[in-house]
Image (cartoon, grey):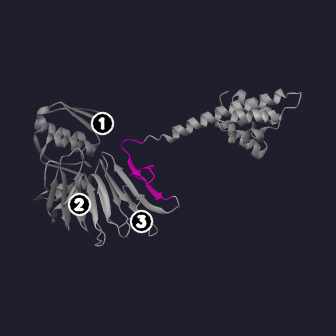
Amino acid sequence: MKSNSELVAILKEIVSNGSIDASRIKLLSPEEQELIKELKENHLLDEALSFVESMDEEQNWEEFKDRINLKKKTIVIHWKTIFQYAAVFIAMLGLVYVFQYKTAKEATVVIPEDAIQLVLENGDIQVLNPNGSNQIIKKDGTIVASQNENQISYSSNKSMDKLVYNEIKIPYGKTFTVTLSDGTKVSMNAGSSLKYPVQFIKGHNREVVLDGEAFFEVSKDKAHPFIVKTRGVDVRVLGTKFNVSSYKEDADINTVLVEGSVSLSNATMPNEKAILVPGEKGTWNNGQKEIVVEKVDTSFYTQWMTGELVFRKTAFKDIIIKLERCYNVTIDNNKKELLDKKFNGSFNKNVETIDDVLKAMGKIQDFTFKKEGKQIIIN
């Protein structure tokens, strides 16, 4: 007999109310309708419902036999009662399978690849809708953060006495803003993740871990330095505005200082430091033994926050990577001679589509492209 949740719901309603609308009974299969009728006639509804709610697939057959033995007399065997219990057992065993299968399916949550994910301290993942609002609540009911559209803000909860971490992951094609518990504002670029304490605690440095790119506006706190850890480089500040770009696919880790002062150090050799002043960029990669500092136009490195894509003598192979992040597409380039070509250009993703960008570049370097969904092929 194939059963479903409607049978259990009807059992519960009959036991609770003593009756049920006949139209509900007709929704069941003929076998289920007969089972309900037999249980009612033999006054077994309560026992059947109690039986299924306490069922354990490893033990219920033995328990079932024990119950049957209690119904036996010395000579006369009540076969009708045995069959009634057998019918209940078989039907409810089917229900247990259905419920377990359904629960297993619900537990396997498929998260879209373009979703903004908030990973909580226990490993649970919440999907943040950039057009919605949400509250992040601890088990004790305390609200630790509130989301309003494209940003999330953490509160300072004085009752916390240990560091508890969240991690936010921003997919390609989207940006997001996190305001930490100390008021520090972090604007995150596409394809980035940030791991940070739900609340900073007195006596501990304010440490976060970045993968990707973000612009930091750090709240001043001389007693608690703010440290950004990323791929072997530590960016240490007290209160300042700076941009860090540290994508795994990029050779360089760049820190650009807009305001204040920062100290850069190699995590494996902390004594090797470089101090930046506003208008400077510090660059480090695994092939260098020291951090290279140079004067730059900081706006070139921060315009991404307003949707700007700016290329200055940028190789086409690097442009492809940035376009994939920005527009959440995959680009296959069949014109290999373009890879090292240098481009200058400026686009805004909020105004111009990926088609607009590639059409403009194609006119300059004489290439065409075909787009199917998120897949783009350059010929």
56 and 188: which one is in front? 56
Residue 68 visible at all = yes
Judge whether residue 116 is colored magenta.
yes
Tag of residue 235: 2
Residue 211: percent from the left, percent from the top?
Answer: 28, 51
Image quadrant in which you'd find residue 314: top left
Q: Quadrant of the N terminus?
A: top right
Which residue position holds label 1? 374
Q: Identify the amino acid type marked 2.
A: Val
Residue at image position (30%, 59%) is 186
Task: Measure the C-alpha gap from mark 3 to mark 1.
Answer: 38 Å
Write down the region rendered in magenta.
111-138
Identify the residue position indicated by label 3 in the image.
155
Relative side of 68 to 56, left or right: right
Q: Going by the picture, which residue comes out furthest to the bottom? A: 222
Percent coordinates x, y for residue 362 in the rendering? 15, 37
User: Going by the picture, which residue comes out furthest to the right?
Assistant: 75
What separation in Å lies between label 3 and label 2 (alpha carbons)?
Answer: 24 Å
